[in-house]
Amino acid sequence: MTDTIDLICNRCKHTNSFRIGCEAFPEGIPYEILLMNKHSKPLPNQKNNLVFEAIREDDSEIKASKNLI
């Protein structure tokens, strides 16, 4: 049986559904975040201050239109 991990990235408003990475890490999510499944503080090498923010229902429609552009 395969375990499924609920990555915070899938529930974050900064994720790019159809692209690699996210608004915080456009080149790809760092291994540290994937391993710990936590991003509550900016990492030392991060070029912005974006951290995990849960997607709200009203964000999902905006995100869907942004990802199609």
Image (cartoon, rainbow, N blue to C red):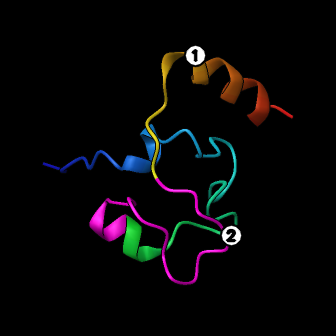
Residue under pointer 2: 27
Q: How many marks?
A: 2
Q: Is residue 6 above or below residue 68?
A: below
Q: Secondary structure at mark 2?
A: loop
Q: Where residue 58 is drawn, which disc sits there?
A: 1
Residue located 77% across and 24% down the image: 65
Regarding mark 1 in the picture, which secondary structure is present there?
Answer: helix
Q: Mostly what secondary structure, the magenta segment?
A: loop
In this rendering, is residue 11 above or below 21? Answer: above
Q: Is residue 45 magenta?
A: yes
Residue at x 29%, y 45% (from the top left corner):
6
Q: Nearer the viewer, mark 2 or mark 1?
A: 1
Disc number placed over residue 39 in the picture, else none: none
Residue 33 image position (x, y, % from top left): 39, 67
The residue positioned farthest toward the right in the image shown: 69
Q: Residues within 10 Å of mark 1 (few under 14, many from 20)?
A: few
Q: Residues within 10 Å of mark 2 (few under 14, many from 20)?
A: few
Query: x%, y% of residue 13?
Result: 55, 38
**Part of the protein shown in magenta:** 34-51
Observer-nearest of 59 and 1: 59
Q: Quadrant of residue 25?
A: bottom right
Question: Which amino acid type corresponds to the residue marked 1 in the rendered image?
Answer: Asp
Q: Is residue 13 left or right of residue 27?
A: left
Q: Earlier in the sequence, mark 2 or mark 1?
A: 2
Which quadrant does the C terminus fall into? top right
